Image (spheres, rainbow, N blue to C red):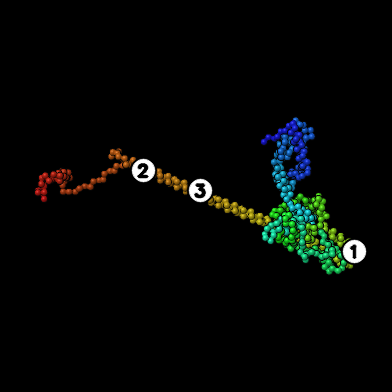
Amino acid sequence: RPPLACSHSLAFSLQFEAGRAGRSARSGAMPLLHRKPFVRKKPPADLRPDERVFYCRVTNEIFRDYDDFFERTILCNSLVWSCAVTGKPGLTYQEALESEKKARLNLQSFPEALIVPVLYLATLTHRSRLHEICDEIFAYVKDRFFVGETVEVVRNNGARLQCKILEVIAPPHHNGVANGHINSTDEDTIIISDSDDSETHNSSAQNGKKKALIDPSLFKYKVQPIKKELYESVTVKASQISRRKHLFSRDRLKLFLKQHCEPHDGVIRTKAMSLAKYKIAEQDFSYFFSDDPPTFIFSPANKRRGRPPKRISISRDKIASKPNTPGNRSKVAKERARLQKQKEEMQAMAFEKAKLKKEKAHAIEAKKKEREDKEKKREELKKIVEEERMKKKEEKERLKIEKEKEREKLREEKRKYLEYLKQWSKPREDMECDDLKELPVPTPVKTRLPPEIFGDALMVLEFLHAFGELFDLQDEFP
């Protein structure tokens, strides 16, 4: 359709709309052009009220020159755009806008009670790929429920009830040691207590390891029904709680993390803006969930491959700064040995992971080759079957044609025969007949009469036979 040519006050109205669109573009994300932010063309500053311009409806821009308008239209319809939210490439401008709108609607339905816990867990990861962080956090969160989250509780009669989690209750034998003897932090450090009356603390301090994560099925949750008439809070088991379907999925979590994480020195880190907005540094994990924060698997950075995680080096500095007493030296030596062992385990784990990745790549390649071979054989077999089918079809057509010819020949012969019979059955003169046959050769009659008088004798005999009664031949010749 032809471009929209505007004039008079409509030009200023479009200028106002284009300016407002530019301000909204600066406040929100725009489709990416060649993976770079797209900036709308601003309206000319000297635009006159009576000037005729070309209006691009898709980008909400105005152009004085038709060639510029045409180039922008072609560019909007080219597959060079990508969604600013999901990063999906190979889209047109309109498709990128729709993808961004759909992704933002998807993000709006992300559970608000999970935002801070998920971002807190993201700060504990050390991965170079976003999907690895997504897999780790999803595996941890999918079976655990956090304070403030709205869940579905299955009652004893089987009915489902919308409730809000008020408290997470850990199993009694996993509550930890009282009096602050063991302080669980994000770092592998040793905290020495002033009291000496706890054998549990000594064994834990010498061990220097964090407790294993508690089985999520052992937790209990104190919940409050959403409906006002059901105001009493109850304590339920983890098996009775579930999230609403599709409320928390792997794809939605990955989309959420993509908005709040960015690569930094080869490692995916949480954005500083997100950390400040939700005050992650001031949060305590025990407020969300009654367990120690998880320790995720270490993944070497892309740019600093093979270097130990930052928190291990910090722990060593803290250990080195402890007073140089015999007890501390022994504990420091054990801690260094433990850290060295942990480093070796991480290196072995990274090596094993690289080996598994290589084997997986080989397996995928072999499987791909096998699939291609099967596909090739299937195509060849399909081609052979198709050729056989075509041959059978051609043979069938040939036999059909031959039978049709044979039937046509028989019909023609029958028609000719009937025509011949019709002609043959018509009355006609003997001389007109063309199928007359010659008389057979007569057989000579041998008698005692001479041949000259044989005819006369027959004539006399015929006469006597006819008129014998008149002459009383019986009397003469009995």
Q: Residues within 10 Å of mark 2 (few under 14, many from 20)?
A: few
Q: Please identify the quarter of the rendering in which residue 427 is found.
A: top left
Q: What label does residue 323 carry, if any?
A: 1
Q: What label does residue 394 carry, if any?
A: 3
Nearer to us: label 2 or label 3: 2
Name the secondary structure under disc 2: helix
Pick whichever, 423 or 327, lies toward us: 327
Q: Is residue 440 above or below residue 197?
A: above
Nearer to us: label 1 or label 2: 1
Give the amino acid type for the residue marked by disc 2 in the picture.
Leu
Name the residue carrying label 2.
Answer: 418
Q: Are marks 1 and 3 in contact (CB under 8 Å)?
A: no
Kindly tell me whether residue 133 is visible in this rendering.
no
Q: What is the quadrant of the N terminus in the image?
A: top right
Q: Are marks 2 and 3 in contact (CB under 8 Å)?
A: no
Horizontal side of residue 391 vs 418, given as left or right = right
Q: Where residue 311 appears, x then y in whole percent?
A: 82, 58
User: Which residue is depicted at the point 73% across and 54% down?
Assistant: 228
Give the amino acid type for the residue marked by disc 1 in the picture.
Pro
Give the amino acid type for the residue marked by disc 3 in the picture.
Glu
Q: Which sits earlier in the primary sequence, circle 2 or circle 3?
A: 3
Q: Where residue 157 appears, x then y in whole percent?
A: 67, 60
